[in-house]
Amino acid sequence: MILKRMLIIFILFAAEMVLCTVVSADVNPDTLLRTADSEIFIKAGFLQDYSKDTDYFNEFINGDIIHQFYNARGKSVEVLTSLRPSPLTVITNNKNLQFDAQRVRGFHASFKMRRVESIPRDGGYCWLRYSDKFQSGIGKERGVIIYPGFKAYSFGPDNGELVYTEIADLSEFNTGRDVRVDIIRLDGVSYFYFDKFFVFQYEDGISALVSFEGGTELLEGANRIRCDFDDFSIVAQ
Amino acid sequence: MKKLWFLLLCCMLFMTCGILSVSAQDLSEDVVRAVTENLDNFFPITTLWEKFDRKAPSIFGNLGTETATETNTNETRNMLLFVNPDGLSTYVFWEKVNSRNSKNFCFSMDVTVNDIYPPQESGCFIGFINDGPSSSAEKEPLQTTMIVISDAIYMETQTEDGSLTDRNKLADRRGPQVNLMIVRLTGETLFYVDGEMVGQYHDGKSGPFSLRYGTVAYSHGEAAECSFDNLSVREVMK
């Protein structure tokens, strides 16, 4: 009886090992980042290094929240400020961080981001997302959004509104310094790297081409969040 | 029993401090620092920059109890106010800044106090008033908010008839010429002297506001002679 149980456990273990081997034989995330640009993503790339300074752009949101963006000192800067604690959570992006013209299916996207200021310390996040927004329309898009230092979510439409589902915990990735993020999407699966270390993968179920955008999120009750972005590049298959 | 009373007293003191700190509506130090360090990008649009180096008409006024003159000399705008004080009235001789009405602005001038007598009863100021065309149906009472160099540097608010409604000392008097700056952003006003933030105020007015500078003589004030230079008005958006 004991032998029979051990045999079943062994068979299950062996089956799991075979499955794992099959998956890892297809893609090894750890080596993928090293070989991706030379062996898979060979189409002409896109690079925005924000080397040209721009004027400051300011606008008011909800009367009392100031949204600012500009390129300076080789970075794209995105800021939300509410002198009094913000009465609501505000999410913004800007034209310098929208890459709608870069529509890709399989890609290697790379960028740096840094949470330069947050008042209070946990007052908001920097984010970057990819989605099929330009094909599906705003509010109907599917995609993945990452908040370094917090979490990653997948999102998609459900009964007329976007529903977010947590897919990874990124709280250990300190964003008070430059964090380099790499996203490689291959055969519908996206592999996410922080500072060149593989962190998680996710099958997003998106069949359309996707584009990118980045920005800031000021949380309710907070005063200020500033994020700097740099060296956004995309190489396609 | 004594311990219980002591605890109760501590609790009451703690609650009083709590209430006071809530009712004091100052912006947090971090927010003030963020605004101060980022004035150039909060206010990137310069709408007026006046060095008073061109000829401008002189103004002379005599209303019996007060005499006022305004001239451009030595590339500064000079304003004189002489008053025969009645012990009751405040006299304000002001010039309206030729910029658009605005709710959010950074208004700066170099101000030299040539003569104020008696020092605690007269002064030189820059400020703003909510006399712009308002979009709200109800007209709010007019209020002038200003930073005044007198025997010290004060923040003041005045009603339309010149009555003082608020007066707080911000800093001691400095050298003969100082740079005064008023930053108003989303309803919060910060006052700066020579680039240093010295006070803040929440006026509760919706505006828009026009900007002013000039001289003031309080109820016992007799003379105020001030020179103004390097007027700058910057805004958040075009």
Image (tube, coloured by chain):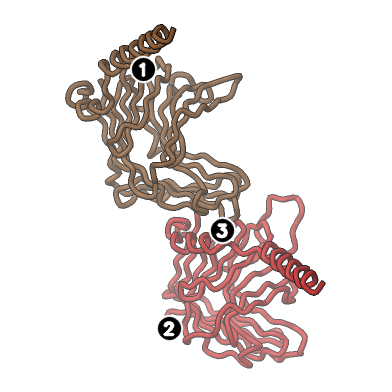
Task: Kindly identify the residue that appears in the image at 33 percent across and 43 percent down.
Answer: A179
Query: From what the image shows, is residue B33 above or below residue B81?
Result: above
Dot 2: what SS? loop
Circle 1 residue: A188
- Mark 3 crowd level (few <14, some 14–19, many ≥20, 10 Å Cα): many
Tell me the distance, in whole angstroms, between the alpha carbons under discs 3 and 1.
Answer: 47 Å
Q: Nearer the viewer, mark 3 or mark 2?
A: 3
Per the rendering, the mark at residue B174 is none
**Image hue for chain B:** red
Q: Amino acid at mark 1?
A: Gly
Q: Nearer the viewer, mark 3 or mark 1?
A: 1
Q: Amino acid at mark 2?
A: Asn
Query: From what the image shows, is residue B44 above or below residue B112?
Result: above
Q: Nearer the viewer, mark 1 or mark 2?
A: 1
Circle 2 residue: B74
Q: Nearer the viewer, residue A19 or A124?
A: A19
| Same chain? Circles 3 and 1 | no
Q: Amino acid at mark 3?
A: Leu
| Same chain? Circles 1 and 2 | no
Q: Is residue A129 visible?
A: yes
Circle 3 residue: B185
List the single residue furthest toward the left. Answer: A38
- Counting residues from the N terminus, which is met first, the one under dot 3 or under dot 2? 2
Q: Chain of mark 1?
A: A
Labels 3 and 1 touching (C-beta < 8 A): no
**Left/right of residue B225 with respect to residue A147 in the rendered view:** right
Q: Nearer the viewer, residue B69 or B200?
A: B200
Tell me the distance, in whole angstroms, between the alpha carbons under discs 1 and 2.
Answer: 74 Å
Dot 1: what SS? loop
Assign the N terminus of chain B to one quadrant of the image.
bottom right
Chain (brown): A
